[in-house]
Image (cartoon, rainbow, N blue to C red):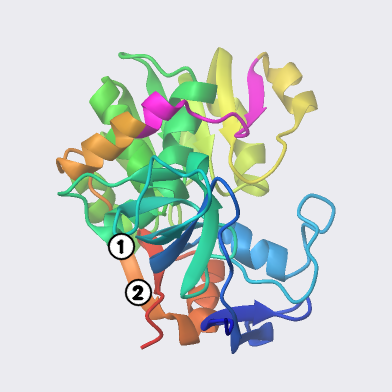
């Protein structure tokens, strides 16, 4: 039987967006407990360009050439031996390594069946943004109703969900965003939006219970002083400074824990019924993955960037 081929984006060496090349490769075969997914949308996340730039060689070692991408939505094409939970034609989303391609394989445990009223666009944003927001707020951040949270980069792929989920929990939400995104973040339900291009957030936010930081660097350094004693800082970008946490009498966490399957199910239902909305910044064809990652790296987008895997 002849092997089937597919289009995929390959990275042959570390470097900038120009190292991404569209190519025809062999279509993967699902092994026992795996399914082959025809990918509809792959999510573009900051981790993708950080690995491609060679910044995370110790944490995420790669073998060249590799296909980028971690999360996608799509349709089950074929099932491996012993798979009973999913069948060809099922609409799914979840973790699919090498998602910048027309097809990808994943274990059954990595995938979630989509409710009928959930779109492929929204589904692609769940694991790539909504789940990270949930774990930063609740799994790591222990946010309760009546508490105050400061959310950095609130218009971004994670921030947009964090604002909505925190409000739904009954928290007071202070958010930072750029000038062009202020109204958008207000529309998500933030109680106070600070324009980080013209103001210092520490002049407006004090005694907060939780900081969710998806920026890192100087933003983290300036965030310690706004937390109340016993507060929590959750970083999505780096292992935060334990020394600074001790100095300020707070807890610092790197967003590494995973929400439960039930949490993910709750999120999926909230998205499907429209209680939590996903803003999609832009959709690029697979052949323009370089431009999608350029946009991601510029970090001025609103919402999530997706790749359409139909190679148009």
**Front-most of residues 239 and 42:** 42
Whether 287 is drawn above or below 251: the answer is: below
Residue 137 picture quarter = top left
Name the residue at 53% across, 27% down.
226
Residue nearest the viewer, comparing 118 with 304: 118
Mark 1 lies on residue? 280
Disc number placed over residue 283 in the picture, else none: 2
Q: Is residue 221 above or below residue 280?
A: above
SS of the residue at dot 2? strand
Residue at 78%, 63% in the rendered image: 62
For the residue carrying disc 2, how many other residues have a C-alpha within 10 Å: few (<14), some (14-19), or many (20+)?
Answer: some
Above or below, 175 against 303 in this view is above
**Is residue 195 shown left or right of residue 122?**
right
User: Which stretch is magenta?
Assistant: 250-264
Tell me the tag on residue 104. none
The alpha-carbon separation of the residues under discs 2 and 1 comes to 8 Å
- In-front residue for pair 123/27: 27
| Residue found at x 63% / y 46% | 237
Kindly tell me whether residue 194 is visible in this rendering.
Answer: no
> Residue 152: horizontal and vertical position, in percent?
47, 43
Residue 122 lies within the magenta run: no
Considering every residue shown, the one lying at the far front of the view is 1
Picture coordinates of residue 139, whole percent (x, y):
50, 23
Q: Image point 42% across, 32% down: which residue?
A: 134
Marks 2/1 in contact by CB < 8 Å: the verdict is yes
x%, y% of residue 285?
Answer: 40, 82
Taking the magenta stretch, the answer to whether it contains residue 257 is yes
């Amino acid at each position: 039987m002849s092997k089937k081929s597919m289009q995929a984006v390959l990275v042959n060496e570390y470097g900038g967006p120009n190292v991404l090349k569209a190519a025809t490769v062999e279509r993967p075969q699902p092994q026992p407990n795996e399914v082959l997914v025809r990918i509809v949308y792959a999510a573009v996340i900051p981790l993708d360009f950080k690995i491609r730039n060679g910044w995370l060689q110790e944490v995420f070692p790669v073998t060249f050439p590799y296909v980028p991408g971690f999360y996608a939505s799509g349709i089950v094409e074929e099932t491996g031996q012993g798979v009973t939970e999913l069948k060809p034609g099922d609409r799914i989303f979840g973790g699919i390594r090498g998602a910048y391609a027309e097809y990808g394989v994943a274990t059954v445990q990595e995938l979630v069946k989509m409710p009928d009223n959930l779109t492929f666009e929204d589904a692609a944003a769940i694991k790539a943004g909504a789940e990270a927001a949930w774990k930063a707020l609740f799994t790591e951040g222990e946010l309760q109703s009546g508490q105050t949270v400061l959310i950095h980069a609130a218009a971004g792929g994670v921030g947009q969900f964090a604002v909505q989920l925190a409000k739904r929990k009954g928290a007071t939400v202070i958010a930072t965003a750029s000038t062009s995104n202020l109204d958008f973040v207000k529309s998500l339900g933030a109680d106070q939006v600070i324009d980080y291009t013209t103001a210092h957030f520490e002049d407006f936010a004090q005694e907060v219970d939780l900081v969710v930081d998806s920026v890192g660097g100087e933003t983290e350094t300036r965030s310690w002083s706004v937390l109340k004693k016993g507060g929590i800082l959750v970083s999505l970008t780096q292992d935060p400074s334990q020394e600074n946490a001790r100095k300020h009498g707070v807890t610092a966490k790197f967003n590494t824990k995973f929400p439960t399957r039930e949490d993910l199910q709750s999120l999926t239902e909230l998205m499907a019924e429209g209680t939590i909305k996903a803003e999609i910044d832009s959709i690029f064809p697979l052949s323009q993955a370089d431009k999608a990652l350029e946009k991601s790296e510029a970090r001025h987008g609103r919402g999530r960037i997706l790749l359409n895997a139909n190679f148009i």
